Amino acid sequence: MILMNLILILLVGGIAAWLCESISTNAPKWVAVFSLIVALYPLRTVLFNLDAITSDAWLINESIPWISRFNISFHLAIDGLSLLLVLLTLTMGMVAVLAAWKEIKQRTGFFYFNLLWSLAGVVGVFCALDLFLFFVFWEVMLVPIYLLIAIWGYENRRYAAMKFFLFTQAGGLLMLLSICAFVLLHYQQSGELTFNYLDLLQHKLSDQSAFWVMLGFFIAFAIKLPIVPFHNWLPDAHTQAPTAVSVILAAVLLKTGGYGLIRFVLTIFPEASYDIAPYVMAIAGFSVIYGALMAFSQQDLKRLVAYSSVSHMGFVLLGCYAFTVQAWQGAVMQMLAHGISTSALFALVGAIQYRYHTRSLKELGGLWQTIPKLSAVGIFFVIASLGMPGLGNFVAEFLVLIGSFTTYPKLTVVATSGLILAAIYSLVIAQKTFFGPLKLGNAIDLDNREVLMMSSMAVLLIWMGLHPQPLIDLAQQTLNNFPLGVQ
Amino acid sequence: MDIQYISNLLLAVPLLPLFGATVLILAPLFSIQIPKLIVSVIAVGSISLAAICSILLNIELNEPSFNPVYGNWIQVDELTISFGLYLDALSLVMISIITGVGFLIHLYSIGFMDKDKDFQRYFAYLNLFVAAMLILVLADNLLLLFLGWEGVGLCSYLLIGFWHEETKNNLAANKAFIMTRIGDTGMAIGMFLLFFQLGTLNIQQIQTSAAELWPLVDVNQKYNLDMVTICCLLLLAGAVGKSGQLPLQSWLPDAMAGPTPVSALIHAATMVTAGVYLIARCHGLFELSPFAMQCVAAVGAITLFIAASAALVQNDVKRILAYSTISQIGYMFLALGAGAFSAAVFHLMTHAFFKALLFLSAGALIYSMHHEHNIFRMGGLAKKLPVVWLCFFIGCAALASLPLMSGFWSKELILGKLLDQHMYGYWLIAIAGAFITAFYSFRLFFVIFYGETKKEPDSQPSRIMVIPLSILGFLAIFGGIQPQGLIDMFSSPDSGQASHSIAIVAFTILVPICAVVFSFFQFKKGVFGRIIQSSVLNQIHRFLLSGWAFDWFYQKIFIDPFIELTRMNKSDVIDLFYKTIIGASRMLHNFLSQFQNGQLRWYSTSLVLFSVISLTFLLSR
Amino acid sequence: MITEGSLFFFSIALFCIGVFGVLVRRNLLFILISIEIMLNAVAVLFVAASSIHNNSDGQIMYLLILTLAASEVAVGLGLVIQMYRRSKTLDVDQLSSMKG
Amino acid sequence: MMTIMAIPTTQILFYIAASVALLSALLTVTRYNAVHALLYLVITMLAISLIFFLLGASFAAALQIIVYAGAIIVLFIFVTMMLHQGDVTIKQESQLFRPGRSIGAGILSLILFFETMFLLSPLYDLSQAGVSTAVSQVSVISTKTIGVNVIGAKEIGLTLFGPYLLLVEIAALLLLTALIGAFHLGRRHQEVTI
């Protein structure tokens, strides 16, 4: 019951954090840190034996009956892809706790409760192999995030939280419809009612029904990813969310969309996905360009980074639907690299806001003169986000593009021009925030906690940029077992 | 030759500066103070060790090429990219230039940046640059080359905007990065295309399999846009962006906002010649496409003429040198296009010497003249700054390719090669360019050092600045020896050296000398007086001063529409759709909530009314 | 003999008088009275049905209506008293503050 | 005690009772004085009770008098007495209820009446409207006379505590709820803002 324990630790940790608030307002964050560290403990057997068991389909596979009447089971399993994303979740969860360390002063217990529960939901989403269970976790991660934005957000938080909730909920509803339709179609044909992913994977729907079921899943995940034209919740949610939540949103929540695409849409409906691939690729290319253009025109630093997320996640979609090994690997890589680099940017913006109480590019400027460490780190992550070779984002974008080029050369050329636009908006961040004449007063530079947080993310990015092979091999394990219709 | 020893030595070349950069960057992040002396020792030490390594490599390497692989970078399916370095005559020349000139410029920078508060940051960037540049020239595959390629771009960006308090510098840095990024994107697409077609990114494998896949096309069809031509043109896009060639040249004059040693190292000696290196490195590919070669030559020829004419009227000493750099790289491109790869690299080498010398002496000049850049506010400095005067003279002479200077040999080689290839049009442009080059370089020299004194220098260059200057001066005079390895590497059996008639050789020698004499009479003696004042000439002057108005053109064509487009869509058009949904449901809400007015009798009446209506409906069916 | 038609006529007429009362009166007390009339109209119908079909189900329903009426009156009158205490009037048009 | 009347007597008695009930009901809803209205209501109840009696539902008739006329109306009268302030109330009521303004409501009720009658009349074929024929046959008003079937208290009791036992429980619950509700609402000291 490794994965079950992992999720339970987070859930119990959340409750403990809530209860601890009565002892001291600082206690919840220590509880959160502790439970995130302890959560790694159940994974020890996998992490120390990666080489030995990569040939199996699942690294861990465990199932207990849950609602036996509908044949729903508590089926959790991870393979290489899930493991990568679970590790990303736990790592970035830690970063989020560190980012919230000083920023959150009110109702800390409830804050960390929500944070840990949403992380538990995300881990559940990455592990669930039962469609019903998947949907349950999908909702579990959603509601705490809603609360986090609505309670601890900035000036326009209610609107943003509601927008976020409605968008995701609309997607969730479509997904639920698709799950039900799929399960019922399966039941009609085989007479066996099951929500089990592995059973349903064997099932072949007719082209017509496969298309509609696939579309339901696709839209749900496209909203989460997010892809233009479903991206509108993201800038508002990011702008209004407290730093820690922005980090969680960027690092792991968006990844559930990409994960869902790979795990469900592409694997269960390869033919239907292949049919719509040209359109999806076009949308993805458009997302890359559109997100970058929007990012350039923003004055709010967080909004800018949020739109850059849209642009980056376009590459994930591009990689998913190119149907080549490289592109697919690139999509996975992009999820990880974007998770780290964009979260780091959000954490930086949070640090700036904590010091200057503004995020406006018009008011900021010349920060290098007072807070050089923060600015240096900021430049690093800006450079990472524009796709500097040697850092994780470049490897990801390179793999996506080189893989997509073999199937859709023209669209890939369009998407590649997003790299130019990425340079433009990234340099706007650097120039208007860190360089130029100093407009605001002095501030305290990064403290040790922040340096630790930022430098660990930087080290991760450099590692991913220079030695991505272990990650690629782990993800390849998933691909070997689910060929995704790659010729 | 011990393979293990050489491969370690080779690895040390890029890693030493990288190590220096890492130390210098990380120390302040963890609040560790390093004294200036230690910073200089780390920075200059790492480069000098790298230079020693490359000298050792020059001695040790006795095979045509050496290709150690240090590990895998990315391996997905058939895509395999390794950390492999490739050493042959070309990369050997390049690393010698980079570490040698880099070392001298580092040394010079200790003096030049002495009073700057960001001494350490400067050397961190500079070391990082050298590391990236070395990776660029040593990479055995295009992706690793691209890593170095973007790495030098990043360092260039950081160093142009080094004095970041001034917005002007940052804008110049942004411009440089974005314009080169445009070229880089083209190059990236070229990489994708090459991988798609050939299934590998290893440069040597690309060239061999390209030769098999695309045999040299028939001369009659040479203007077809076949696959190899597209690949070459995309790579050319990258080269053009990095090397400041047309149409992506306009960032280079602005890049002079950085510290002068940076201009010397990055924007004259090494980084901007990366494009030349790339094409020379992929010469096997380019030779397959005559059309692409024509494009390279055309780009070089047009650029060299435009830049030389722009250099003619500039006032800022660094801008003159920047335009002259563009123009000289144009010569290299012309040589590449003519198939004279070894001549191009030879010119790259001599250019690195004399242009670095010119920039460093310009730096010394500016240092002594209270950061004065305008040459017309100087004058009569020959006696007051004798060292600078001498360095300038050597540099200008080499740039003007006066006989027996280093620049002379390389330029003669290029001109001769053009004649060999029967490219007479290009030869004429090159000759015209040589005339203009000689003219403007001595205009610079005479205006600064003769005439009346307008401003007194306040200090002489310090000794640590003079040592590199004198070494570079020596190299600029005597560095005109073409490395034998290059000749061996690029010589193809059919290109025997044709001998030219004495008259033509004499003509090419005389042209720069005439220009110098003309310049002497114009600017020293003032024989021809001030340029005739007329509105047409004024217009031309303004046009040339703005570098043929490329900036204005790009502003109108690309930047303004782009900004306008993004400004219009600032609040996201797609959001309107969702706002409409919100608005519609709010209107519906307002409409429906009127019925929910709390009037009990209204409720009962509507209840009865609707039962009557529904009954009526039922009955009328 | 009583015809079914006349019984229906009577019941519906009584019901509509009750409806009329609910519609036109603004006094809460009168509305309650009108509701009693409507309830009685339905009760008549149930008892008639009981007679027509000759079984006791209709009368059971009548008993239930009786119970309902009793409860309704008890609660309704309680509300009437409360309302009178609060606003010194029984005009239901004054009761719109809840927007119920 | 109970004698079954001769046929014409039953009919005549029914018409008289029905007319009285309708007339007094109409008067009930149009009075200004609540006490008068309630007295008319009592008359309605008594007339309905007579009709029940004529239909042979003697138990229901008895309950109608005891519970309705006896208990519920008396409850009304108590409350009315509590709130009644003589002429002032009548004057107030005459302002609240204006017969002239109730024409619309009257027309609405009349339409409802005619439509319902039409729905149940033989003129209208319900099967036309898609209602299943089994229902339509039952629903159509016929001139069939109703045989007087006496259903006594014993029979009702047996049914009530037999198949309808659950209903009794529910009714008991309902009454209990009403009791609690009325008690709660009727308390004087509470100052609840709703």
Image (spheres, rainbow, N blue to C red):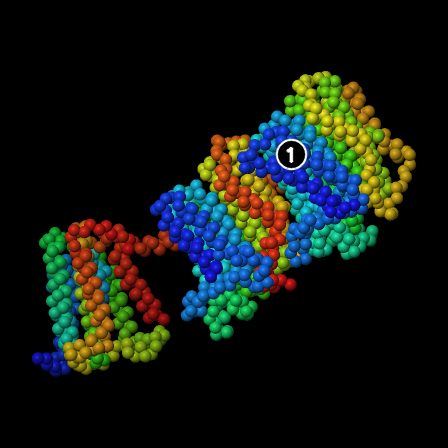
Q: Is residue B57 above or below residue A5?
A: above
Q: Residue at x 26, y 72 (%)?
A: D117
Task: Judge whether B491 appears above or below B505 on screen.
Answer: below
Q: Is residue B441 left or right of residue A239?
A: right
Residue A12 visible in rendering: yes
| Quadrant of res B527 | top right
Q: Chain of mark 1?
A: B
Name the image quarter holding residue C59: bottom left
Q: Residue B526's x, y, as percent?
A: 77, 20
In the image as oriented, which residue stretches furthest toward the left? D1
Residue drawn at x 69%, y 55% as measured from the top left: B196
Residue at x 12%, y 81% (from the top left corner): D4
Q: Where residue C55 sits in the image (x, y, percent)?
A: 21, 80
Q: In the rendered view, does D189 fall on the left or right side of B289?
A: left
Residue B333 visible in the picture: no
Check disc 1 and give the amino acid type: Ile
Q: Residue at x 14, y 76 (%)?
A: D58
SS of the residue under disc 1: helix
The residue nearer to you, when weighing D108 against A200, is A200
Residue situated in front as seen by the camera: B470 or B525: B470
